[in-house]
Image (cartoon, rainbow, N blue to C red):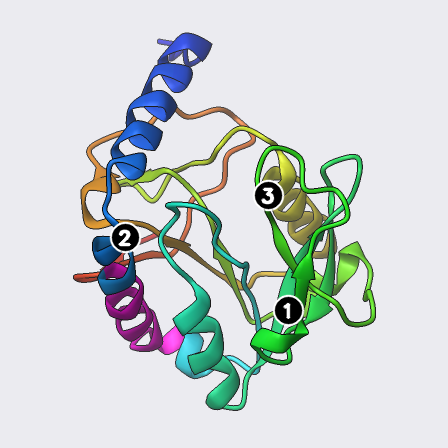
């Protein structure tokens, strides 16, 4: 029996619900969650043992990453951050601390902060030992639901073409680990999800 492809409206509905729940979070809750998320993520062996981590700067009510970026830098990791290109692909540059961030030249609908240093090219992510992925949900199989912009689908496809196999970790709120998300053929499972209350790991 052939499984039916996901209904696009199902993904859209789920994204709307999850984004609405995030917008309802208070500023205090966002700060508390960000600190707890940093502690959880730093306990992952994949991050503890990584030399280079590709991460991102959270925006709006996303699970906060600023504490985590500084913790990784303090631990001696090389941290790469994305630079959004006009076609929605991602370039990369090194994170050198909070003062190295600047407002994006192409911010779109969101106020993005990006690293101001030398651009390393889209392929720089293939040298990462771990890649932290934004998302809206992940299910018990490790399948991730993104925002739908396609930037990280390109990153994952680039890793596959290069034969690179970094640890893939999604950063979410606790309630965003769900039973199942709609899945498409190009979707890649992740190895773990870090939330403010801890880590959930997935088997291949």
Q: Is residue 106 magenta?
A: no
Task: Determine the residue positioned at 63% across, 63% down.
Answer: 81
Q: Secondary structure at mark 2?
A: helix
The front one of 103 and 10 is 103
Please rate how many residues cluster around mark 2, counting C-alpha atoms within 10 Å: few if below 14, some from 14 to 19, many from 20: few
Magenta-tinted stretch: 33-46
Ranked by sequence position, the earlier of labels 3 and 1 is 1
Precedes in sequence: disc 2 or disc 3? 2
The residue lying toward the viewer, choosing from 177 and 72, is 72
Q: Is residue 41 magenta?
A: yes
- Tell how many labels: 3
x and y, in percent, of residue 153 in the image: 60, 38
Label 3's element? helix
Distance from label 2 to label 3 (Cα)?
27 Å
Instruction: Residue 116 in the image: state x and y as whole percent.
Output: 75, 67
The image shows residue 46 at horizontal and vertical percentages of: 41, 73
Give the label, 1 or 2, closer to the camera: 2
- Residue 27: mark in rendering: 2
Q: Quadrant of the N terminus?
A: top left
Question: What is the spatial separation of the Cα atoms under label 1 and label 2, in whole angstroms?
Answer: 27 Å
């Amino acid at each position: 029996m052939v499984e039916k492809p996901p209904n696009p409206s199902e993904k859209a509905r789920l994204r709307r619900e999850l984004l609405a729940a995030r917008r309802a979070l208070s500023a205090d809750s966002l700060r508390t969650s960000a600190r707890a998320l940093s502690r959880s993520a730093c306990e992952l062996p994949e991050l503890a043992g990584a030399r280079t981590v590709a991460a991102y700067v959270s925006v709006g009510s996303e699970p906060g990453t600023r504490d985590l970026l500084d913790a990784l830098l303090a631990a001696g990791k090389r941290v790469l951050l994305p630079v959004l290109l006009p076609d929605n692909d991602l370039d990369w540059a090194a994170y050198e601390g909070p003062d190295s961030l600047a407002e994006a030249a192409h911010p779109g609908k969101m106020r993005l902060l990006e690293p101001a240093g030398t651009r390393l090219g889209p392929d720089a992510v293939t040298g990462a030992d771990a890649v932290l992925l934004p998302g809206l949900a992940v299910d018990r199989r490790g399948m991730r639901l993104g925002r739908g912009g396609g930037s990280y689908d390109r990153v994952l496809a680039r890793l596959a073409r290069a034969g690179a196999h970094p640890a893939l970790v999604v950063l979410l709120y606790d309630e965003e680990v769900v039973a199942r998300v709609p899945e498409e053929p190009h979707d890649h499972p992740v190895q773990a999800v870090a939330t403010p209350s801890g880590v959930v790991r997935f088997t291949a």
